[in-house]
Image: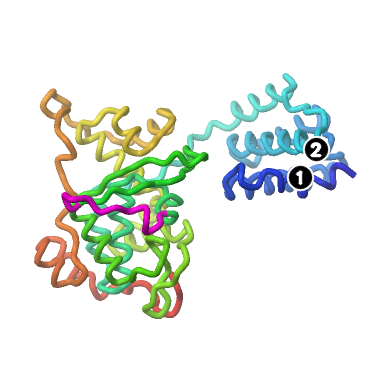
Amino acid sequence: MQNLNWRSEFQRLEGAYAPATMLSYRSDVEAYERWCAEQGEIPFPATVETICRFLEAQGKEKAPATVQRRLYAIRKVHRLLRLPDPTDHEDIALAMRRVKRARHTRPKQAKGLTRDFLTRFLASEPDTPWGLRNWAMLSLGYELLTRRSELVALRSDDVEARADGTLRVLIRRSKADPFGEGRAAFTSNRTAQLVQDWLDWRGPRIGWLFCPIYQGHALNRDLSATTVKRLIKEAAARAGLDPSDVAAFSGHSMRVGAAQDLLRNGFDTAAIMRAGGWKSINTLGRYLENVDDLPSLGPSFKTRVWGFEIGSLGGRSGQARRARSPQIAQASGALRAASGFPETSAV
């Protein structure tokens, strides 16, 4: 009967792992159970031979990282059920090595939403509440190097106005910070103004910094992480990018592009890791490997700070934007007729 109880045992993990991790673990164990049913194997307790066969079968269809995660999930169930854990056996380690060597796949890297793309995307946004929100979201996500989950998790009280007109933003929890130690990040004056313009329209009674809009009214609930990916892709399409480029953008593109811009502007990897809250230099290395137009980094260049601000941004209305940035206003006027976000659904 023990093999039927892993779902109830998983309740012990609630709060110790992120919801996305819990969903992945459940999905992985269910995939293992289905395979066992098809093969006539008993899933729990598993034998070394059963797990090896499962890993090698999965390796023919799935990425090595997925297979590795499924092994972790099987290990977790054995420990939760207090069963002998076979996953540390040398044969299983060898099976995983064969999986990794058999599939020579590089991790797919999102296209970087660099400053040039950001300027074009912001110019494409319509003069609507949705456009106002997206101006603030894209600008803030870029300057803070946020993951999409971090951006939509921001609360209104995570943002603090500073005397110099910028914002201090507390990112409370992230993928690399599961225990919520948090990191502080700072914005430019322009992005601070964009966020304030959005808050002026949104009103004070909503806890989430960014929220859905339904029929022209702000809703007091959070956005899904997929909203970030969708608004980036829609902005890329409105800006006239090739469909293959549109498809290459993801919810991580702001983080990738900002890191690439920092490298182009002479910052070393230690500074970029601190700015974006990276714990692994290998992960950052994948973000930066496509930067092939680096200048010669002389001493004076290395001591330079950002060296640029995000265009001449800000303003709630098209008139205000034109006053602050003639170039962006021209592009915005040319694209203003493009279809914005639908007013019949909360997005």
Residue found at the very far top of the displayed protein? 90
Q: Is residue 194 left or right of residue 48?
A: left
Name the kind of residue labelled 2 in the image: Leu
Chosen colour scheme: rainbow
Q: Quadrant of the N terminus?
A: top right
Task: Give how far across and how far down residue 152 sits, in percent.
Answer: 43, 56
**Residue found 33% across the figure and 51% down from its top:** 141
Identify which residue is drawn at 60% across, 29% down: 100
Q: Which residues are magenta?
A: 154-165
Residue type at tag 1: Glu
Mark 2 residue element: loop
Q: CA distance from mark 1 to mark 2?
A: 7 Å
Let me know if residue 344 is in the magenta part: no
Residues at badges 1 and 2 in contact (C-beta under 8 Å)?
yes
Q: Which mark is residue 9?
A: 1
Q: Which residue is mark 2?
A: 81
Helix, strand, or loop for circle 1? Answer: helix
Q: Is residue 250 visible?
A: no
Quadrant containing the C terminus is bottom left
Q: Residue 159 versus residue 293: which sits nearer the camera? A: 159
Tag 2: Cα neighbours inside 10 Å, few (<14), some, or many (≥20)?
some
Residue 68, how many percent across, how many down?
63, 34
Query: Camera-side residue: 250 or 214?
Result: 214
